[in-house]
Image (spheres, rainbow, N blue to C red):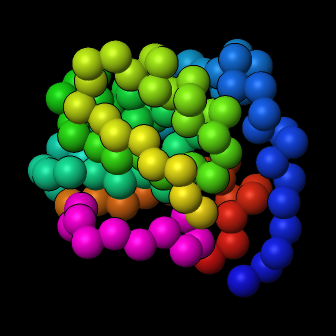
Amino acid sequence: MIDHNNQEEYRDPRNYDLEFGGETDKYEFFLELAKQHPGHVLELACGTGLVALFLAERGIPITGVDIVEPMLAYARVKAKGLPVKFIEADARTFETDQRFSMIFLPSGARRYICI
């Protein structure tokens, strides 16, 4: 595993949402995949929950994992009442007994996660 940390880019969740929010084509792509694989979904490197919350708003039960706590804290604020759970963990070493019908890693995450 490569030991690299560029998390400073992800310390301002509001700015992150302004920069990357609204990529609805990508969100729709993941929604269609989730519909094809009904059940609980896992998003690795979920950040502020842009994709996870989009799916949860459409009834998809989802868990998001991210290593940057300020991003998750902001995602939790935005998630009020939705079927979504956020976990602070490194996607490279995250383990769980829960099974998922779909696991995905958004394209932007490749910048800081090498699996």
The x, y position of residue 100, in whole percent, is 24, 62
Image mark count: 0
Residue drawn 55% across the image and 74% down it: 93
Q: Is 14 displayed left or right of 28 in the figure? A: right
Q: Give the range drawn in magenta.
A: 91-100
Residue drawn 21% across the image and 36% down it: 60
107 to 47, vertically: above or below: below
The majority secondary structure of the magenta stretch comes to loop
The x, y position of residue 6, in whole percent, is 86, 53
Instruction: Say which of 98 and 18 sits in front.
Output: 98
- In the displayed image of the protein, which residue is found farthest to the left? 38
Q: Would residue 13 be seen by someone viewing this image from the given angle?
A: yes
The x, y position of residue 98, in whole percent, is 23, 65
Q: Where on the picture, by quarter, is residue 70?
A: top right
Instruction: Say which of 107 and 86 sits in front.
Output: 86
The x, y position of residue 13, in whole percent, is 69, 25
Q: Does the magenta stretch include residue 92?
A: yes
Image quarter of the C terminus: bottom right
Q: Where on the picture, by quarter, is residue 99?
A: bottom left
Q: Is 5 displayed left or right of 68 in the figure? A: right
Q: Is residue 18 magenta?
A: no
